[in-house]
Image (cartoon, helix red, strand yellow):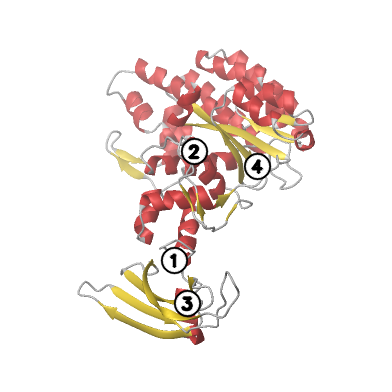
Amino acid sequence: MKNLIKDMFNVNEKDIEEFCSKNDDKGNIEIIIRLKRQTVYCERCGNKLVSNGIIAKNVKHKILTDRKLKLLYKANRYKCKLCGYSQMEKNPFALRGFSTSILVMNQVMTDLHNPRYNYTMIAQKNDISVNEVILYSDSFIVIPHIALPINLGIDEFSSNMAKRRNASYLGVLTDNDRFALVDILPSRNKSDLNTFFSNCPKEERNAVKYVTIDMWKPYEEMAHKWLKNAIVAIDPFHVVEHLTKDFSNIRIRIMKRCIYGSNAYYLLKTWHKLLESDKYYLDNEPRYNSVFKCKLNYRDLKKMLLEIDEELTKAYDLKEAYRDFNLHCSYEKAEEELNNLIYNFAKANIREYDEFLQILINWKKQIINSFIRSKETGQRLSNAKAEAMNNSIEINIHISNGLTNFPRFRKRMIYCFNDRVFYSLTSKLTSMKRDFKKIRNKT
């Protein structure tokens, strides 16, 4: 019971003079607490104070998930006979000037660390207002200086918040070794990239060894301009993404050439994933196929797909050759094998692969660099962790029904995805509204 009282109300049982509870008709609980009187001295003259009654205070204290709990705190009041100054005892439940308990505030800050909660969800969970949650987020999250990492990832994601900078994407900087968010930029434009890197100390910029980007030329230009000692690599996922899209376009073109309703059309329309994905176990138990009126497994269907058109087979073999290269090649052999792939793609002369061929030629050095392994983790250079982080960030934007305040959004996302960012409860509240006016200053 002693530990329960301490955990639930942040006080020791020996300090409690009165403690009782009652339920109302709706099943809600009201806790009444009064603390023992202590020896207290005047804040002005230092004289010993005497008792001067009790003042009842309601404290928001939602610590139960299924029932509402109301905390009625009977605060002892003291008065100085010498100077007449009155003061309250120190409130163990809430910060001075606040009606929400410290335990609830801590829970709100813990919930804010989860990007799958929007402000409304957190407010409902803790039985406080949405504005109060936003104020806590604005006021208590403390973002220290975050140094540039050795293995830097530069990426982006689509957001309406970038429109203020005449852009479609926000820029994202990540620590690829630690799975941590370094910063979010108002856009991925050169101006914002220049501003960010110019504000970083030269020693930090020179300490960056690897930079992983997608195929956005300004990223490469900024890396060469500001990160003089860094090796620039292309994220392998983005290269394979282009290859998969081009192969899909080849498949669609060949499908449109087939007679609608034919066996070939049916296979290319229904079973194309057997050519585009390797997640299928091809030697599964055969199942009856109503079109071919016999039992077939995935391997049978895949073989039939590749027999439809010679160009489709050639395109599939090239796709698989690059994927095998991407998965299994070493840095030492990457240049030789990539040269062979470039030759084979050019020789095939498939028009949908022209774009991919240009990617291999234009970004050849950066693709080869992607096979370098980080000394910290032993993993290849890639933005895989940044992509996973971006997915969670986009979920937060989606469940929030759109966000418009970029500084507030940036602050919370860094708090969610960087363990070096913390929170500190204080009696001072500020708001990150667009005019950035201080709306409340409690002392």
Q: Mark 3 points at which residue?
A: 78
Q: Which of marks 4 and 1 is in front?
A: 1
Q: Residues within 10 Å of mark 4 (few under 14, many from 20)?
A: many
Image point 70% across, 35% down: which residue?
Answer: 329
Q: Name the residue under label 2.
A: 436
Question: Is 260 left, or right, of 338 in this rendering?
Answer: left
Q: Which of marks 2 and 3 is nearer the N terminus?
A: 3
Pick the front one: 310 or 427:
427
Q: How far apart are marks 2 and 3 (CA)?
A: 39 Å
Q: How far apart are marks 4 and 2 (CA)?
A: 33 Å
Q: How crowded is mark 2: few (under 14 residues within 10 Å), some or many (20 or more)?
A: few
Q: Earlier in the sequence, mark 4 or mark 2?
A: 4
Q: Nearer the viewer, mark 1 or mark 2?
A: 2
Q: Which of marks 4 and 2 is in front?
A: 2
Q: Mark 4 points at which residue?
A: 176
Q: Earlier in the sequence, mark 1 or mark 2?
A: 1
Q: Name the residue under label 1.
A: 101
